[in-house]
Amino acid sequence: MVKLSVIVPVYNVAAYLRKCVNSILAQDISSELYEVILVDDGSDDGSERICDEYASRANQPIIRVIHQPNQGVAMARNNGVALAQAPYVAFLDADDWWAPNYIGQMLALIETYPEAGLYACKYWYHKNGRNEDRIRNLVWLEYKPVSPRVGLINYFKSYYAGGAMPVWTGSVVMPKNVFDRMGGFPKDIRLGEDFLLWAKTAMYYSIAYLSECLSYYNNDIPATKRATKHLHNPAHHMLWKLDELDSWAAMSKTSTYTDWRQLCDKLRAAGLQAYWLSEEYHAIAKAELSKIDWSHLPRSVYRWYQRPLWLTKCQNRLRGIAGVIKQGLIKRH
């Protein structure tokens, strides 16, 4: 019986796709336990042919391919889930990859916490050929005295305390019925569509967590291909959609609502900096910043927004130049 459907959205990633799919096929459990659904989202760089190549192979887990006009990563994943045959779904973007024991460990986590609405593990942040564990200060609601630690986490407090995303799309398994109940990935969001889904889920379900890095978040890709390197239209950015989840949070426990609001403040303060410096989006960023309760945030963050705009722009430009120089030195070594 197929227990897990792996959804891989594919869009012009020919240089990375084989490594991604091969890492799925190299899992150290029976291939009868999972299927792979490759969703070609209108690729024109040869990725579409690579998808068909894998689907035509024999003696491997079931691989199916969907070819669709470009609709964005959220719809690609949603359409893949719609065809999933398993009770659980996992997601892996086509430029990332898994450790060989990823699926086996996640299925074990499901057996340990069958009531959870989301399952996740730590992941490696891969940059300049190096792996870094950035997940810090997880806030556990309960855990078992084993190593690596497994248990239930407070998602909002963990994100707030650690600074890095404790739950990332390439390290998540979700019951398909919960995915459907939560409405899937919001189709009109281009940046943060995954966060909105995990946040909504965390308001109503437990999140089971494995404190072992079993997935690789690849940042060794051109900046033009990374969603975080662009100023997205606010209509497609999760920072301008946070208020829409307030009603969901308000219906949950009071403590959950407080944790949610504090995380929203921190995400706005950090994520709106580039929009604040932009002439096009400065006014709308200012309006969004007015919603923040600064009392629980570092005073230095508040002062950053109080400085003369021209001074902040100059400092930001100098910081960018220094970053480019630093990256060049790292690559040389």
Image (cartoon, rainbow, N blue to C red):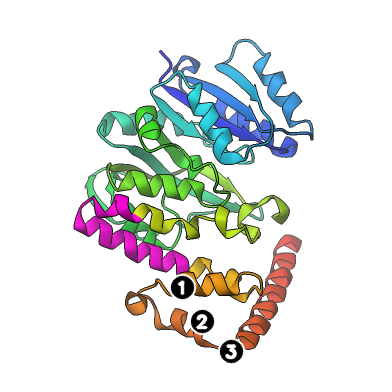
| Residue at image coords 64%, 83% | 315
Viewer-side residue, 16 vs 212 = 16
Q: Position of residue 83 (x, y in %)?
A: 51, 21
Sooner in the amino-acid sequence: mark 3 or mark 1:
1
Mark 2 and mark 3 in contact? Answer it, CB < 8 Å. no
Q: Nearer the viewer, mark 1 or mark 2?
A: 1
Can residue 189 be found in the magenta stretch? Answer: no
**Residue 121 appears in which quarter of the rendering?**
top left
- Neighbour class for label 3 at 10 Å: few (<14), some, many (≥20)? few
Q: Is residue 246 above or below residue 11?
A: below
Q: Residue 284 location in percent, x, y?
A: 55, 70
Tally the numbered discs. Answer: 3
Q: Nearer the viewer, residue 58 or 288?
A: 288
Q: Main secondary structure of the magenta part?
A: helix
Instruction: From the image, tell me which residue sits under label 3.
Output: 308
Q: Amino acid at mark 3?
A: Pro
